[in-house]
Image (tube, helix red, strand yellow):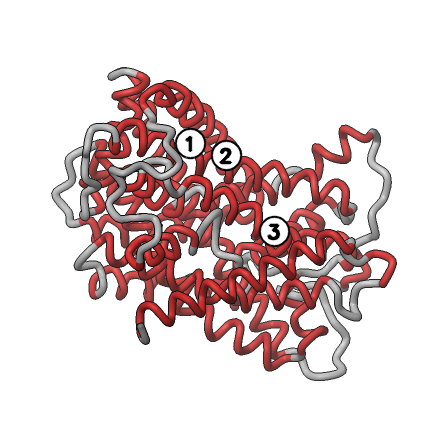
């Protein structure tokens, strides 16, 4: 598909009204929420509540707060430059960093796709009896979502995601409200599976926070979605509109993470229910959280909603990850000194190759590394956490790099906030390496 010159995309222009401008910008933030409300919420947040009551809730909310600048720099960079973070990495650090970023992300993103797919398959198995194994169902779902993603592009993804995220959000908030009286609000209950100051709790905390509210790679995907929306509209959204769109998705993801913790604490922890290790068994427990709080009527409705949201999460990452890898390929292979072009990523040969390659790699992972669902999920979260300080630093220096005019760079407050996040994530990552491999 021929490239489109970047000059065809105009700078921010006034919309018909203030409301119209902000409504037009909505989209990437919802996709952010759709991608985030996946395994980190349905699996890890619920399990945290089931095993620790609300003992880890404060840490989860602090993680969401702490990581905010690292994620916000994605749509922010698009609003001031018109380019994604992938192009920002090249112009700030050079081609080698873009190539290294893509090489590291290929196995990581395939693992995340496999994790989301097996969770979605588990939810499907909790709704209707399945004769096929969970990995096989997961592979079928990856194939179907891959076809839809390639055929529908950004517009289909945006519409489907908004509908089902809203449905699950409403039912989850209602279920959490009903579960509130069942929760033991002790700061760190004695019934937690391990003491607060223990290696076991620290390791679990790292695993839970790895994708809370999501992997920082999602900032790059968000910037690419913002770029795609701008191309579809023929104009670039300004920073204020981007921030509103992002905040809606980000705050929503944080609120729903807290809701899943509360449901796990109120329904499972209070009754001493141990989270199941299998994907189907755990998914059935998640559905029971709704039926025990909202009533039997909610079982089918919420089960279908949870499944469809996980399905849209799978759709989202099967668009976002190949989009990110193919954008990295085009950026990396552009000769030094060549004029930058703004390519249409979706439907391109690189996107198709990335989509097929990541899907096949995810299928291999599902059939070879899925012996224990719980251990696999912990591995996914820990890998994401160990990479988070590096990605946070890349985003920080790109947002404050030479490609961003000094007058438009992030404020001193958000930069200090970002430095705090980088330092904290680095210390926690080093601490995890120490207790797991040295201590």
Residue 59 lies, in percent from the top left, at: 45, 46
How many numbered discs?
Answer: 3
The CA distance from mark 3 to mark 2 is 23 Å
Residue 144 lies, in percent from the top left, at: 35, 48
Residue 302 or 425: which is nearer the viewer? Answer: 425
Residue at the extreme bottom: 336
Direction from residue 214 to residue 399 in the image, left or right: right
- The residue drawn where x is 86% and y is 39% is 14
Secondary structure of the residue carrying tag 3 is helix
Q: Which residue is mark 2?
A: 255
Label 1: how many residues lie within 10 Å, few (<14), some (14-19) or many (20+)? many
Residue 198 or 125: which is nearer the viewer? Answer: 198
- The residue drawn where x is 66% and y is 66% is 2
One can see residue 157 in this view:
no
- The residue drawn where x is 22% and y is 34% is 284
Of marks 3 and 2, the one in the foreground: 2
Direction from residue 49 to residue 16 in the image, left or right: right
**First reached walking from the N terminus: tag 3 or tag 1:** 3
Label 3: how many residues lie within 10 Å, few (<14), some (14-19) or many (20+)? many
Secondary structure of the residue carrying tag 2 is helix
Residue at the extreme left: 131
Residue 259's mark? Answer: 1
Q: Is residue 410 above or below residue 128?
A: below
Residue 225's mark? Answer: 3
């Amino acid at each position: 598909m021929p490239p489109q010159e970047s000059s065809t995309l105009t700078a921010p222009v006034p919309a018909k009204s203030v409301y119209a401008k902000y409504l037009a910008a909505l989209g990437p933030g919802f996709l952010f929420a759709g991608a985030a409300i996946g395994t980190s919420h349905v699996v890890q947040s619920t399990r945290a509540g089931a095993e620790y009551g609300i003992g880890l809730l404060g840490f989860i909310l602090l993680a969401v707060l702490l990581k905010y600048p690292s994620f916000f720099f994605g749509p922010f960079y698009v609003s001031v430059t018109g380019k994604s973070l992938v192009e920002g990495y090249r112009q700030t650090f050079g081609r080698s960093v873009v190539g290294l970023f893509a090489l590291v992300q290929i196995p990581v993103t395939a693992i995340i796709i496999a994790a989301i797919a097996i969770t979605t398959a588990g939810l499907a198995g909790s709704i209707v009896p399945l004769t096929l194994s969970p990995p096989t169902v997961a592979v079928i779902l990856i194939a179907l979502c891959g076809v839809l993603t390639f055929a529908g592009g950004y517009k289909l993804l945006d519409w489907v995601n908004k509908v089902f995220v809203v449905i699950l959000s409403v039912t989850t908030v209602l279920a959490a409200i009903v579960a509130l009286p069942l929760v033991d609000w002790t700061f760190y209950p004695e019934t937690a599976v391990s003491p607060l100051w223990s290696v076991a709790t620290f390791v679990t905390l790292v695993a839970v926070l790895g994708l809370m509210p999501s992997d920082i790679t999602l900032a790059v995907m968000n910037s690419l979605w913002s770029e795609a929306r701008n191309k579809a509209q023929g104009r670039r959204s300004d920073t204020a509109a981007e921030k509103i769109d992002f905040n809606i998705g980000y705050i929503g993801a944080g609120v729903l993470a807290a809701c899943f913790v509360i449901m796990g604490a109120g329904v499972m922890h209070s009754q001493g229910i141990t989270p199941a290790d299998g994907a189907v068994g755990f998914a059935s427990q998640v559905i029971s959280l709704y039926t025990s709080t909202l009533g039997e009527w909610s079982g089918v409705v919420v089960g279908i909603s949870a499944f469809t949201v996980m399905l849209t999460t799978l759709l989202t990452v099967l668009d976002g990850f190949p989009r990110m890898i193919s954008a990295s390929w085009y950026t990396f292979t552009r000769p030094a000194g060549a004029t930058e072009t703004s390519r249409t990523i979706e439907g391109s040969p690189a996107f198709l190759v990335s989509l097929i390659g990541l899907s096949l790699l995810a299928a291999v992972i599902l059939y070879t590394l899925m012996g224990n669902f719980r251990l696999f999920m912990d591995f996914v979260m820990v890998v994401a956490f160990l990479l988070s300080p590096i990605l946070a630093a890349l985003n920080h220096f790109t947002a404050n790099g030479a490609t961003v005019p000094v007058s438009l760079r992030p404020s001193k407050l958000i930069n200090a906030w970002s430095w705090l996040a980088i330092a904290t994530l680095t210390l926690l990552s080093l601490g995890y390496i120490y207790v797991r491999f040295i201590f």
